[in-house]
Amino acid sequence: MLKRLPHPNVPAEYSPGGRLRALELQRFLARLHGALAEIREIPPVTLYVLDEADWRRFTRLPYGYPIQRSKPGEGYSVFAPMRYPDRLLERLTRVFAEAARRGGRPPGPLAVFLDLMIAHEYAHAVAVAWGLRARVRWVDEFLANYLYMLALHQADRDLYTQARAWAELASRLEPGRRSLSGFERYPRRPLGEQLWFQGVFTLEAARMIETHDGRFVRRLLSQAPLSRRDVHKKLIAAEPGLKHFFRIFGEKVT
């Protein structure tokens, strides 16, 4: 049976033995909540910190990589493992070693990188709550990267710097496919390719934040809710500089 850690903004449930881990992550996400709630109110997002057996009760997705499930009116949830399995750490070690051969090196332990991905999943939940889910996969991923980097920039500049450094390293990978349309068609792309996209999304988010702070999301919220039909126009209206960013993918979005 899961145990509970009450909190007004990030209530947590955890598997036996996971209290300290749940408390640490709860405090981390609560700080991000505080940063983003200055922009707009955020409903409670429940954090689940689970061992592998409890994980299987909620999802068939592989144990270890954080995920989220959110739906307005039904609740917002982020799922994190109680510990990262060796098989996941070994896969990431191989991929980042490949990136390091192209220049750079990991800025810290892989566990920190994966904990940052919990923040990314939390940002997905916030985006859903704010009407910023477009149901265009690359857009939703880009916005989650933007929101979690914005929260880190406000709440923890050291972690923001680490997240940026991980993105720099991931951007050195060489993807087989780099088109945005391909991002939609091939959701089960190789891990290195996924990390490359997340890396370049994060670096562009960092550029926007360092140039204009939270202007982009405030402009986008004025046009919410987003939809597949007009999301590209709304993105460019909120940040005209994105036209240049799209060239990385060999595509022009208007």
Image: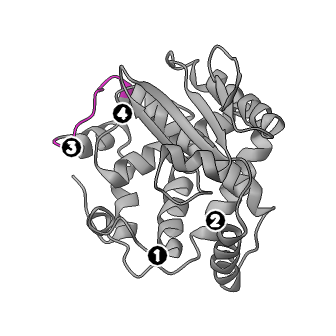
Q: Earlier in the sequence, mark 3 or mark 1?
A: 1
Q: Which mark is residue 126?
A: none
Image location (x, y in percent) of residue 230? 19, 40
Q: Which stretch is magenta?
A: 221-229
Q: Name the mark nearer the viewer: 2 or 1.
A: 1
Q: What's the distance in space between the residues labelled 4 and 1, CA to CA?
A: 27 Å
| Residue matched to label 2 | 168
**Type of the residue with mark 1:** Pro
Is residue 183 visible in the rendered image? The answer is yes
Total numbered labels: 4
Quarter-of-image position of residue 97: bottom right
**Type of the residue with mark 2:** Glu
Residue reaching furthest to the right: 20
Q: Secondary structure at mark 1?
A: loop
| Residue matched to label 3 | 228
Q: Residues within 10 Å of mark 2 (few under 14, many from 20)?
A: many
Q: Residues within 10 Å of mark 3 (few under 14, many from 20)?
A: few
Task: Name the residue located 72 percent from the left edge and 47 percent from the top edge.
Answer: 82
Residue reaching furthest to the left: 229
| Residue matched to label 4 | 132
Task: Name the residue located 43 percent from the left edge and 50 percent from the top edge.
Answer: 141
Q: What's the distance in space between the residues labelled 2 and 4, CA to CA?
A: 26 Å
Q: Earlier in the sequence, mark 4 or mark 1?
A: 4
**Type of the residue with mark 4:** Leu
Q: Main secondary structure of the magenta part?
A: loop
Q: Secondary structure at mark 2?
A: helix
| Residue matched to label 1 | 190
Residue 140 versus residue 183 in the image, above or below: above
Q: Residues within 10 Å of mark 4 (few under 14, many from 20)?
A: many
